[in-house]
């Protein structure tokens, strides 16, 4: 089967590895940081405008892939809800000695509860591991997109990108 976003709607590992929005392993080890999984050259740049620290650059032409300046990124997570493609995540790899935090956009209802343990899923919506919902954000400025932060076993930080729909568990 052909891999990649053009064929599956989901980026392949090769596409993710070469995305200029992906932080280095060294930066991931340092603390919370944006993880931009934008791999299609489409005319789009809300992420660039959303970042208060100028850590994301699209520039010109507008079809450039967003580039993350990982040293400028504070891991605030503000850019997550700005992306119409739901392609921006936040990773805190060393949230605890055994767990990582993954924050992602979520546009389904009902939302889970903070503190709830929920099944977490990969980019294809397949179950990966149980995770604990730490924080749900849905301010007016997010324009209807919520963000959910889950604590998961550290080994799955590259896989978990959402939670299973509540009606499925
Ligand atoms: S997490 Fe915050 S600082 Fe980092 S790119 Fe997103 S908006 Fe900018
Ligand atoms: S807002 Fe999302 S889809 Fe648009 S350029 Fe930024 S990361 Fe890519």
Image: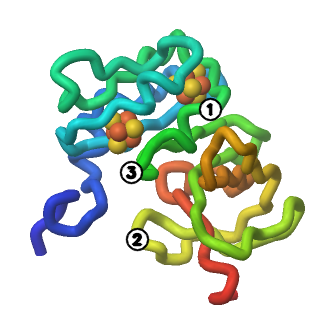
The chosen color scheme is rainbow
Q: Which residue is mark 1?
A: 78
Residue drawn at (63%, 26%), measured in percent from left and top?
Answer: 75
Marks 3 and 2: which is nearer the front? Answer: 3
> Dots 3 and 2: beta carbons under 8 Å?
no
Q: Which label belongs to residue 126?
A: none
Residue 129, image quadrant: bottom right
Looking at marks 3 and 2 on the same chain, the residue that comes earlier in the sequence is marked by: 3
Q: Which residue is mark 3?
A: 85
Front-most of residues 11 and 62: 62
Q: Which residue is mark 2?
A: 124
**Pointer 2: residues within 10 angstroms few (<14), some, or many (20+)?**
few
User: Residue 130 at x, y = what percent?
Assistant: 70, 70
Whole-angstrom CA distance, mark 3 to mark 2, is: 15 Å
**Pointer 3: residues within 10 angstroms few (<14), some, or many (20+)?**
few
Whole-angstrom CA distance, mark 1 to mark 2, is: 24 Å
């Amino acid at each position: 089967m052909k891999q990649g976003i053009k064929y599956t709607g989901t980026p392949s590992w090769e596409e993710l590895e070469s995305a200029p929005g992906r932080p280095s392993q060294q930066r991931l080890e340092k603390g919370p940081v944006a993880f931009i999984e934008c791999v299609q050259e489409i005319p789009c740049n809300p992420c660039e405008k959303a970042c208060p620290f100028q850590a994301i650059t699209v520039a010109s032409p507008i079809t450039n892939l967003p580039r993350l300046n990982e040293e400028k990124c504070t891991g605030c997570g503000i850019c997550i809800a700005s992306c119409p493609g739901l392609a921006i995540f936040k990773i805190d790899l060393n949230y605890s000695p055994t767990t990582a935090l993954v924050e992602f956009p979520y546009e389904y209802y009902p939302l889970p509860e903070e503190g709830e343990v929920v099944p977490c899923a990969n980019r294809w919506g397949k179950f990966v591991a149980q995770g604990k919902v730490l924080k749900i954000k849905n301010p007016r400025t997010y324009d209807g997109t919520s963000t959910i932060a889950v604590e998961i076993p550290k080994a799955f930080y590259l896989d978990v990108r959402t939670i299973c729909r509540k009606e499925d568990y």
